[in-house]
Image (cartoon, coloured by chain):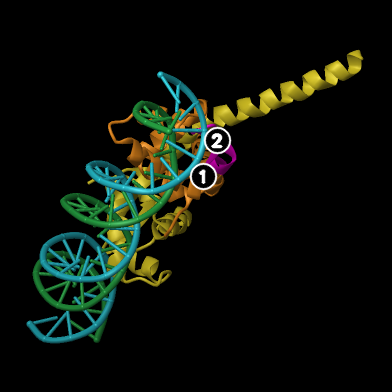
Chain colours: A yellow, B orange, C cyan, D green
Amino acid sequence: MRRDVFQAIADPTRRAIIALIALHAMTPNTLAEHFDTSRQAVSKHLRILTECQLVKQEVQGREIYYQLKVSKMKEIDKWLEQFRKIWEQRFSELDNVLLTLKNKENES
Amino acid sequence: MRRDVFQAIADPTRRAIIALIALHAMTPNTLAEHFDTSRQAVSKHLRILTECQLVKQEVQGREIYYQLKVSKMKEIDKWLEQFRKIWEQRFSELDNVLLTLKNKENES
DNA sequence: TATATTTGCAACTGATTGGTTTCATAATAA
DNA sequence: TTATTATGAAACCAATCAGTTGCAAATATA
């Protein structure tokens, strides 16, 4: 059973759940009200999110509040880092090209 | 057929392909040498990456060089933005708590 | 205590996934 | 021309996925 952050955010419903609980913790029932699917389906999504540590539970009587572990979201950010470097580099290379062209222009 | 960036990066092989061609464009054959799967499997991944616009082709004779469309990677970055705001906010809230504690300490 | 509510889990189902093998096509090399 | 090489597409397959329904357990309320 592959269970990582990237597989977790692949599903649109799960991304919506993440966005909702990012604002404030919610119970599975209240979460399910926001979707067209059953409460059990939402529960399944929450299980997946819990398994990959994107979410943590806070039990309060018979209710369970799920809240986002923002720290885990940074893993995606961390993966993006390598590409951020590349795209910034590419932009600066483009800058250099433009700069060279401008200098040549001034020389003539 | 759902085909978005998030579904595309869910697969570890596809993430590896992205990382490889981020450095420089590659043909399916040379790409496949880096993996344990068949050339055709890599080709399939490239199709998925192409369909969601993460990759573009550059035909050169009978070879096809695939290169990353870095701009499309920013879509993930853009989605992360909303959470980045939240986690910065949470940190500053934590800062405030610490600051308040420190102030109280000074008062006594 | 009896009943209602909140939840997770198991079993099942149809669709999708990632892989394979086989084949067709186009470009290059002998 | 006749291989050889590079590639994509089709057909198939086992595994996984996202959803369903039904049920059990635990907490709260009457």
Q: Is residue B16 visible?
A: yes
> Can residue B59 be found in the magenta stretch?
yes
Disc tally is: 2
Where residue B43 appears, as percent x and y from the top left, is 39, 40
> Can residue A89 be found in the magenta stretch?
no
Left or right placement of residue B66 versus residue B43 in this view: right
- The residue where tag 2 is placed is B59
Task: Name the front one of labels 2 and 1.
Answer: 2
Give the amino acid at mark 1.
Ile
Q: Residue at x 62, y 29 (%)?
A: A88
* Disc 2 packing (10 Å; few <14; some 14–19; many ≥20): few
Q: Residue furthest top?
A: A107
Q: Nearer the viewer, residue A12 or B86?
A: A12
Where residue B1 appears, as percent x and y from the top left, is 42, 60
Q: Which residues are magenta?
A: B55-74
Can you say whether B15 is above or below D20 in the image? above
Give the amino acid at mark 2.
Val
Can you say whether A36 is above or below C1 in the image? above
Q: Tag on residue B76?
A: 1
Where residue B104 appears, as percent x and y from the top left, is 51, 37
Q: Residue at x 48, y 56 (%)?
A: A23
